[in-house]
Image: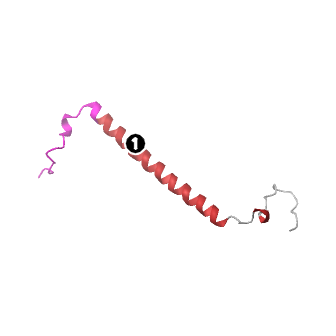
Amino acid sequence: MPPMLDDDAPDRKYWTAYDHFMVEREARAMRRDYAYKLLGAWWRAVTSAAVRFAPQDRSKARTAAPLGAPQRPN
């Protein structure tokens, strides 16, 4: 039994190369949008975590010494 098609959907066997191109173009745009939103959500989570764990008094914040440098006593 053939799959039921929506009456408004075009028949794919009559699609042109341009139709296929535009469908792929729209799919790429949707994937790009999803990736950017995912990256933005990740970045917001990282920055909010950094703000939560940052010391409130900046005078108590320690700076990182270069590798191999002697450590300064606190």
Q: Quadrant of residue 56?
A: bottom right
Q: Is residue 12 above or below residue 50?
A: above
Left or right: where does residue 38 sit relative to residue 62?
left
Residue 50 sits inside the magenta stretch: no
Say which residue label 1 marks: 29
Taking the spot 19% from the left edge, 37% from the top edge, the residue there is 13
Q: Main secondary structure of the magenta part?
A: loop
Q: For the C terminus, give its image quadrant.
A: bottom right
- The residue segment tinted magenta is 1-19
- Whether 13 is drawn above or below 2: the answer is above
Comparing 18 with 34, the one in front is: 34
| Residue 32 percent across, percent down from the top left | 44, 45
Please determine whether, in this image, residue 50 is positioned above or below residue 33: below
x then y, percent, for residue 23 = 31, 39
- The answer to whether 17 appears left or right of 61 in the picture is left
- What is the three-letter code of the residue carrying label 1? Ala
Name the one closer to the observer, 53 or 57: 57
Query: Residue at point 40% right, 42% down?
Result: 29
Q: Residue at x 48, y 54 (%)?
A: 38
Place of residue 12 in the rendered image (x, y in percent of width and height, measured from the top left): 21, 39
Colouring rule applied to residues: secondary structure
Q: Please state which of residues 71 and 62 is positioned toward the viewer in this rendering.
A: 62
Q: Is residue 21 left or right of residue 46?
A: left
Picture quadrant of residue 49: bottom right
Q: Residue drawn 16% across and 44% down? A: 8
Q: Considering only vertical position in the picture, is 18 above or below 63?
A: above
What element does badge 1 sit on?
A: helix
- Looking at the image, which residue sits at the far left? 1
